[in-house]
Image (cartoon, rainbow, N blue to C red):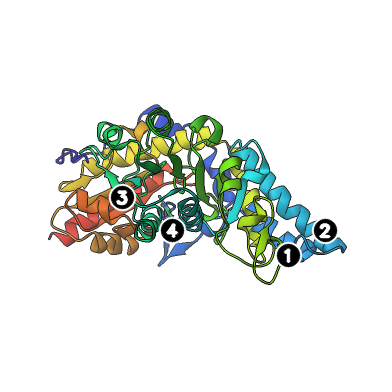
Amino acid sequence: MVTYSSGLTDAPARPESVRRGAGLDVRAIRADFPILDQSVDGKPLVYLDSAASSQKPRQVIDAISNYYKRDHANVHRGVHELARRATEAYEASRERVARWVNATDAHEIVWTRGTSEALNLVAFSIGQARVGHGDEIVLSEMEHHSNLVPWQLLATRSGARLRYVGLTDQGQLDLDHLASLLGPRTRVVALSHVSNALGTINPVREIGTLVRAKTDAAYILDGAQGAPHLPVDVQSLGCDFYAFSGHKMCGPTGIGALWGRRALLDEMPPYQGGGEMIETVYPDHSTWAEVPHKFEAGTPNIAGAVGMAAAVEYLDRVGLAAIHEHEMTLTRLAVTLLSGVEGVRIFGPAKAEERAGVVPFVIEGTSAQDVATMLDAQAIAVRAGHHCAQLVVNRYGVSATTRASFYLYNTIEEIERFAAGVRTARDILLS
Ligand code: PMP
């Protein structure tokens, strides 16, 4: 955690790169997002809550709508034209998402409801296959509850032991501590790619090398905040599983994906039973369909998959490297401006390069909730609370933070309005 010096009263001059917006045509991008073009109580909406859920471009909305208008039927089972088209759309979407994360094979993508379900699937199934009494599961204090509670459930079921990597005062994983926790009993290492509560971008590739060198554990990454903001190449990251959600990356809610190494997916038992996931059913047992269908019981979220593929297409067209660059510009500006507001304490890494577009903060002497409410009164949407990461806020001695989070459609003017809004909130709350 970093406590930035307070007391600057004048906003610093904007550097040239900030004025230009670092390469993205944000005006054109905003035209793709109809929801952003609205006022709240007469003031233009400033949406700074994308880490909770991003907004959707017209291209994604249209893809879902067109699918329902033209192609919908249930997948895989039918012989008629619409069933063929729906199956084709569903499986082509899987291939698109597989290409996006550079999977070697589309069969390595399992559709889920989102990151939470993907992580529950891995915890359950790898747990059955590989984790026993006395084994160790390495997590960190930075984890979202979705990458924590499933492992607690597994530990309770199996008698395995949870080990937590501590955090530095700068909001980073303590890598020496991590190295000291890895050993012959480590069966699982599960960490976030990017922290939703601090914004920290973790050095997951280097950690992968360390995990491989010291253990034969399964290495699992929670990519809920990584996939929307950073190019993901699962082959070079060196992980075994990567979980992500459609709704955080311009796609619809209710869809996400788990990428897993084929050999591990083959080894793991199913997570849920039902239609679609079986090969043959006998009275007393069943055999399983091939991966990934083994993990996809019941009628899937076909329109969601189509929407997620459209989101990937959209992000690819804009370019994740440019998006990340733009977010760093916004983050740098937000941190600089907030540091000028007396009493503001910002959490997470000091360097913008080490932080995704997430800026959590408190104003000393006020409640995080009150600050968010004051910002809402100015039509600025942020989030307050523990952000489903209670261990993180506890680590830094607070019970909640106010969190602003940025995405490709946010502008420099919005960041300036946000900082001015924080200053107003402070003045009113502490007057
Ligand atoms: N992990 C992280 C880091 C997250 O930010 C989130 C969403 N807040 C999740 C997991 C869970 O994602 P979902 O709610 O889409 O399942």
Which residue is depicted at the point 26% across and 40% down? 171
Pinpoint residue 197: horizontal percent, then vertical percent. Answer: 32, 49
Which residue is depicted at the point 20% across and 49% down? 395
Which residue is depicted at the point 83% across and 63% down? 82
Mark 4 is surrounded, within 10 Å at the Cα level, by few (under 14), some (14 to 19) or many (20 or more) other residues, namely: some
Residue 233 visible in the displayed image? no
Label 2 secondary element? helix
* Quadrant housing the N terminus: top left
| Sequence-earlier tag: 1 or 2 | 1
Mark 2 is surrounded, within 10 Å at the Cα level, by few (under 14), some (14 to 19) or many (20 or more) other residues, namely: some
The residue pinned by badge 1 equals: 68
The residue pinned by badge 2 equals: 84
Please state which of the two labelled residues, at mark 4 or mark 1, is closer to the viewer: 1
Please state which of the two labelled residues, at mark 3 or mark 4, is closer to the viewer: 3
Whether residues under marks 2 and 3 lie with C-beta atoms below 8 angstroms apart, the answer is no
Q: Amino acid at mark 4?
A: Leu
The residue pinned by badge 3 equals: 162
The residue pinned by badge 4 equals: 45
| Sequence-earlier tag: 2 or 3 | 2
Residue 87 visible in the displayed image? yes
